[in-house]
Image (cartoon, rainbow, N blue to C red):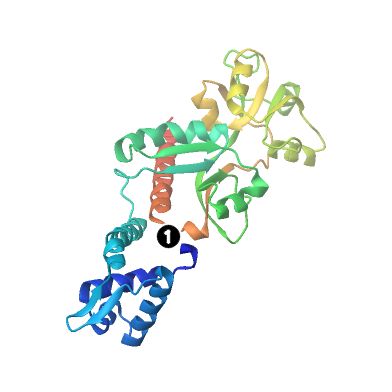
Amino acid sequence: MNLSKVDLNLFIVFDAIYTEANLTRAGQIVGITQPAVSNALSRLRDTFNDPLFVRTAQGMVPTPMAQNIIGPVRNALQLLRVSVQESRIFNPLQANKTFRISMTDLIEAVILPPLFQRLRRQAPAVQIESFLAKRRETTKELAAGRIDFAVDAPLNTDPQVRHVKLLEDRYVCAMRKGHPLAKDKISLDDYLSLTHIHISSRRSGLGLVDLALGKMGIQRKIALRSQHYLMASQVMQQTDMAMTVPESFAHRHGLHAVDLPVNDVPAQETHLYWHESTDQDPANRWMREQLIELCQQVCAQEKKL
C-alpha cells in the first residue's frame, strides 16, 4: 500500500462509517452525499484490498481488517486535529520551538540579553539560534523557512518581505576615555587625524561617513576593517584608534562619544524582517511582538542616559 497516494479525507469517511454503520448517516456527519461516501469506501477497499464493511440487516458491519485499523486511524486523526488546532494558537509557556534570527553581533548585544530575560519568564522552553545570513540571500532564506527573522538595515525592498523599524540611533565618533582627543567637541581636522576602525559585513565598500566625506573630496584613515563591533571596542580601549558607531554602542561600552564633525551622515536604522507567508502565524507574530516591545524599552532607557 502506497500511503503517499491515499487521500486523508478517506480516513475521515472510514471513521464515520465505522461509527454510524450507515453510509447515509456517515455522509451527513462528514458533509458529503451518500454516493460520495460509497465512492470513498470503494477507494478504501482498493487501498486495503479488503471489503472493510459488510452490509447486513444491522447495518455496515466492520471486517476484522477494519477493526484492526480503526484504533490507529482515530489516533492519527486526533493527532492531526490537535496539530491543526495548535497551529492556530501559540502558548509561549508550553511552546518548545526554536526561532532562527539573522543579526550582527552589535544587534545581538542589544536584543539578546533582554530577550532572554523575557523568555525565562514567558517561554522557558523556546530556543534562539542567531547567525548572520548573507544579505542578498535573506529573502530566499525567509521564504524557505531556514530563518524566521532578519534584523538589518532597511535595504530589502522585496514585496514578499514585511518589515518594521526596531531601532534608530545617530552616529558619533567614539574613542577610549583618556584619549588625547576625548573632549566635548572635535574639528574635522581632528577627525581626519585619527586612525579609524571600520565595521562592515561586506569585504569592501564605503560606510555612510565615508560617503559623506567623499562628497567633500576627503577621506579618513582606516587601519582596521572588521565585521565585529565587540572586538573593535576592545582594540580602542588599548589604542588611540577611533570608530564611528551608533551612540548607544559607545555608552554601553564605556567609550567617550563626541558629535561627528561631518554633516549628512544619516542615523542608523535597524528593521525587523519576516516573510509574508508567516505574517499571520501565531508563533511568528508572538515573537515579533516581543522583539518590537523590548526594542521600544531599550530606546526609552537609552534616552534617559
Q: In the displayed structure, does residue 105 sit left or right of residue 49?
A: right
Q: Farthest residue toward the left?
A: 58
Which residue is identified by label 1? 280
In this rendering, the count of numbered labels is 1
Q: Above or below — where is 73 with respect to 201?
A: below
Quadrant position of residue 238: top right
Q: Position of residue 130 (x, y in %)?
A: 52, 37
Q: Position of residue 177 (x, y in %)?
A: 57, 16
Q: Above or below — where is 296 with respect to 25?
A: above
In the image, 235 versus 24, the foreground residue is 24
Quadrant position of residue 158: bottom right
Q: Identify the residue at image location x=41%, y=47%.
A: 287
Q: Identify the residue at image location x=45%, y=68%.
A: 6
What is the crowding at mark 1: few (fewer than 14 residues within 10 Å), some, or many (at least 20)? few
Q: Is residue 145 visible?
A: yes
Q: Identify the residue at image location x=38%, y=50%.
A: 286
Q: Is residue 270 visible?
A: no
In the image, 264 versus 210, the foreground residue is 210
Instruction: Report the amino acid beneath label 1.
Output: Gln
User: The C terminus lies in which quarter of the figure?
Assistant: top left
Q: In the displayed structure, does residue 53 sit left or right of residue 131?
A: left
Q: Position of residue 65 (x, y in %)?
A: 31, 66
Q: Farthest residue toward the right?
A: 217
Q: Dot 1 lies on which element?
A: loop
Q: In the displayed structure, does residue 170 sit left or right of residue 79?
A: right
Q: Identify the residue at image location x=82%, y=37%.
A: 217
Q: In the displayed structure, does residue 194 sit left or right of residue 296?
A: right
Q: Position of residue 183 (x, y in %)?
A: 60, 19
In the image, 37 versus 32, the foreground residue is 37
